[in-house]
Amino acid sequence: MNRIIFAVFLAVSLSSCASGQPPEVIASRDPAVPNAGRQNASYETIIGAYHHRVAVDPKPWRHSNDSQAPQKKTHEGAGS
């Protein structure tokens, strides 16, 4: 119980050492000059490099599957 009270006392006493005032906020530009620090805006399309693709019928899967499968190893010289 004494350790809990000591831990709470330590936390409260250390938090009182912290600065009570928030840091000063510095404006990045003068609000009286609305165009100050603004970069030129240019139009960029939101769809970027979009390419129209037409739906196609599925191709036979057997050739595609066989071409991507690992090649079977042949045992050379086994039992002639």
Image (cartoon, helix red, strand yellow):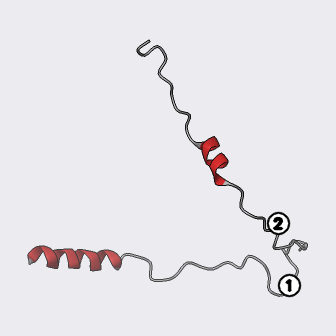
Q: Which residue is mark 2?
A: 53
Q: Is residue 53 above or below residue 16?
A: above
Q: Quadrant of the C terminus?
A: top left
Residue occupied by mark 1 = 34
Write the residue at 66% across / 48% down: 64
Three-letter residue code for mark 1:
Pro
- Assess disc 1: are there few (<14), some (14-19) or many (≥20) residues with their C-alpha within 10 Å of its C-alpha: few
Give the number of the mark in front: 2 or 1.
Answer: 2
Q: Residue at x 49, y 17 (%)?
A: 76
Q: Nearer the viewer, residue 22 or 78?
A: 78
Q: Position of residue 22 (x, y in %)?
A: 52, 81
Q: Position of residue 61 (x, y in %)?
A: 65, 53
Considering every residue shown, the one lying at the far left of the view is 1
In the displayed orientation, state which residue is furthest to the bottom: 32
Res. 69 image quadrant: top right
Q: Secondary structure at mark 2?
A: loop
Residue 53 found in image quarter: bottom right
Q: Secondary structure at mark 1?
A: loop
Instruction: First in sequence, mark 2 or 1: give its number.
Output: 1
Residue at (27, 76) in percent of width and height: 11
Instruction: Identify the residue shown where x is 12% and y is 73%.
Output: 3
Residue 69 sits above or below residue 26 on the image? above
